Amino acid sequence: MIMEGKWHLSLFFFLLFVLAKEVVVAAPPNIIVMLMDDMGWGDLGIYGNPAKETPNLDQMAAEGILLPDFYSGNPLCSPSRAALLTGRLPIRNGFYTTNEHARNAYTPQIIVGGIQDNEILLPELLQKAGYRNKLVGKWHLGHQPQFHPLKHGFDEWFGAPNCHFGPYNDKNTPNIPVYQDAEMAGRYYEEFAIDKKTGESNLTQLYIQEALNFIDKNVASKLPFFLYWAPDGAHEPHYASSEFLGTSQRGLYGDTVRELDYGVGAILGSLKAHGIDNNTFVLFSSDNGAPLNDHNGGSNGPFLCGKETTYEGGMREPTIAWWPNHIKPGRVTHQIGSVMDIFTTALSVADIDPPTDRIIDGQNLLPALLSDTMDANKTMYYYRGNEMMAVRHGLYKAHYWTWTNSIEEFMSGVNFCRGENVTGVMTHEQVNHTLSPLLFHLGRDPGEKYPIKSTAAEYKAEMPQIMEIVADHKANLIPGTPQLNMCDNAVMNWSPPGCEKLNKCLKGPASEPQKCSWPH
Amino acid sequence: MIMEGKWHLSLFFFLLFVLAKEVVVAAPPNIIVMLMDDMGWGDLGIYGNPAKETPNLDQMAAEGILLPDFYSGNPLCSPSRAALLTGRLPIRNGFYTTNEHARNAYTPQIIVGGIQDNEILLPELLQKAGYRNKLVGKWHLGHQPQFHPLKHGFDEWFGAPNCHFGPYNDKNTPNIPVYQDAEMAGRYYEEFAIDKKTGESNLTQLYIQEALNFIDKNVASKLPFFLYWAPDGAHEPHYASSEFLGTSQRGLYGDTVRELDYGVGAILGSLKAHGIDNNTFVLFSSDNGAPLNDHNGGSNGPFLCGKETTYEGGMREPTIAWWPNHIKPGRVTHQIGSVMDIFTTALSVADIDPPTDRIIDGQNLLPALLSDTMDANKTMYYYRGNEMMAVRHGLYKAHYWTWTNSIEEFMSGVNFCRGENVTGVMTHEQVNHTLSPLLFHLGRDPGEKYPIKSTAAEYKAEMPQIMEIVADHKANLIPGTPQLNMCDNAVMNWSPPGCEKLNKCLKGPASEPQKCSWPH
């Protein structure tokens, strides 16, 4: 009897093991990418914001791993987001302009272009592998219907294709539509209110709720999911819900950050409550540095300049990865990373091979996240439009071109580096340093204030290797067809899909395509 | 039998209770103040340094409480240290100059003055209450024998009276002596080597060992102790021991910071090992902001300018308090604090009343540290020499005077705000804004880049109250006799006490007192 009992027990455990293994095989890890808009490296408590108002993100870092050397794909939103979803530099995936040299470009609603069908997006690959994908928030990869998220791998979408600028009068410019999946659900400043006087809007709450509902649904259906949580909060015009308005010592910007931080806590809390935290890889970052032009309130910490520039403040992002029981809590990795690595890393998490028919710039960060493995050869390329402005290798950064903005723009009050002045480094002309790049050591000098003299032994020791890497990069570069060259008032969001049902179709002007004007 | 046993047990517990109570009464909490030299707010991982190389300090913060709104007593070393030990503004305790308006002054070895006998120092009060006091490291309150630590409340001293500048040739200038208690034990660059070529020195290790020995000794003798740990590391010339040299991504400065961080870990570890961590109040801070003049490597995070200035970068300090079982771990308080509060807070920890015969600027921080109590009326005064340059009340800071340094000095390359430029705020003339101070909101604008217009409603609502506070402050101000006016080559460290025993007495010149020259 006792023997028999033991045998039964063994069988039971064997079956349990088989079952458990099957469960593991059947449930690839969920993936959540939280991408903030215009949030700076220095906006998080854990990254040194003096207000210390991000308890949930600080806790996420304590449970996860910090990546202080993580970058956006571009100093501007659309190209950075296209880089994230394709794992490729904007110069390759087409999110740049050739209208003028080294100009930032994005996807306002007059843009004609968008993400091309021949680009392979992360959600497309995940979808094929059985993932259920949702974008909550800003798309910014083209607002014409053929470019929409549901045409490029997402199963669901709640959010807008463009920035929440406005309100517009619907005559010269329509308000930006908010989509529920393939059809519009209303427009900003109309069905989706933003009070520009008080700064009140419940949009972040909607984005949080959409995320939580999506998680609930997939837990119920036992499907692996990819959630791309990209609220437009932290991009101006700033807003917060009544519960958060006036709660920050940082003003409305801080209220916004606090509400986003609350959202992060709510989402991670939901994963824990569902017991899927150990099976969900989460990465938090931002699409570019905080803009310093107006008094927005964002902080790039100790880094130089901000959004629109290829100094560190323009592209260094406040990044945290989180995956309980896989990532050891409380660690820091100085592995150079970028939003393009999210593509490759997410594929690795899902055990999917990346495409081999094209150059993928993203690399798999899992070795750095799961152990102390560091790829010292990782290189970061800082592009502005069609020009490689700078390159980072190890702790060295070489500026091949420098430019803040034109002196005319600067004199009229546009300043991407407010309060800062590093002579010869911040230039109001596009200065070509290609023959003798400006070299900085970002360990000793993260603020890029002390170029290493080109006569110094250190310069002579480091620069040749960087030159070689850059030569190799340029030799292998086949620029994609630029998508951000042409603008046309006719393509604006006059009559988005679904507008008939809501009686919200507007009539736009006749098509008159012209070259977009990109001032900086 | 059982009843009797129970009674015996009750008696036993009662006696234990009496005994325990007696032990508590007999052992007031130990106090450790760790004061770094020239370390900036942004030098710690927990305060946002991108290198994240201070694991022990970050852990101290996780176990203790962060004070992101804590200030030095002055933007320069000696006055700040005098403020800490007296709990009084330098303008009151005499650590300032009237040679010229608003000039920074300190105690180089030609200074004649020093701490006066009529000032009451923290260690004097603690000594009277039975504490055993030791200074490990830099004194900087006057190097002539009458000013020495052992004349002002310390029982022991290992360290130097002045900065570790040098090496000198002993003809025009003697090397700075290092003291063991009342007598010199050698000199920097002689018995206490600093290799300026390699940056190697074991001084920080000596300072750590002295601290650990002092703790061991007092644990053995069961005496309460006050340790003032003030290594000169992080002040230039930078040095680190061979074990730390070359280990930081931040260069030699980072090596220094790493070694100091190691020291913090060693000291806190010793308290834990001895089981006295719950009975030891520890406060970590710095004496002024990181200097930005040369490429020292220190960081003031997002704050404007550095050492020598009364912008936030000159006086905001990386501060952590730690007292296990008393301070709840992982908290943050935005209570405005300053090194002067260390005086009053330490007295409160030791249950000693502060002096009532004079104005004490320091206030007790324990309510903010032990609970969430915030004193919203706390005011911070930013002095430079004999002038109140600025004042902070709540989140508002009003600059009554602005000055970086003279245009002549600036043109010759001296720059206290390298890489920064805020027009009208950073001025190369001493600009008097007293009638209409420059007002900033440090929550929305910690970098002091956006003065609030004097026509704004916010300005009109806030400024009158600040004006009233300042008027009150000035009405009650009786400046102390300035100690930093006179200099004399004859008072240098030619023949410090104990030099005979070491055969290290030097002959100085005849006395020729003259007004010190303070360029900024």
Image (cartoon, coloured by chain):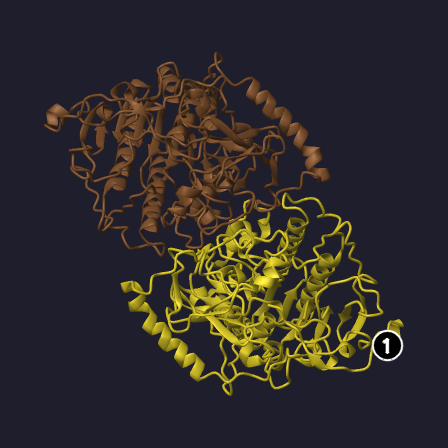
Chain colours: A brown, B yellow
- Between A9 and B133, the residue placed more toward the observer is B133
Q: Position of residue B274 (x, y in %)?
A: 64, 61
- The picture places residue B250, in percent across and down from the top left corner, at 63, 46
On the rendered image, what quadrant is the C terminus of chain A found in?
top left
Circle 1 marks a residue in which chain?
B
Asked if one can make out residue B87 in the rendered structure from this viewpoint, the answer is no
Q: Specify the quadrant of the image occupied by residue A393.
A: top right
Badge 1 density bin: few <14, some 14–19, many ≥20, Cα 10 Å = few
Query: Residue B419 at what x, y percent from top left?
Result: 54, 51
Q: Residue furthest right?
A: B503
Please name the residue that numbered disc 1 is placed on: B507
Q: Is residue B253 left or right of residue B45?
A: right
Q: Secondary structure at mark 1?
A: loop
Please name the residue shown 51% across and 61% down the image.
B316
- Tell me which residue sits at (87%, 76%) in the image: B500
Q: Of residues B76 and B148, which is closer to you in this image?
A: B76
The answer to whether residue A76 is seen in the rendering is yes
Image side of residue A70 versus residue A245, left or right: right
Looking at the image, residue B15 lies above or below residue B257: below
Residue at image x 61%, y 82%? Answer: B128
* The N terminus of chain A, quarter of image: top left
Q: For this rendering, which residue is in front, A176 or B182?
A: A176
Please state which amino acid type lies under the numbered disc 1. Answer: Lys
Q: Position of residue A157 (x, y in %)?
A: 27, 27
In this view, which residue lies farthest toward the front?
A408
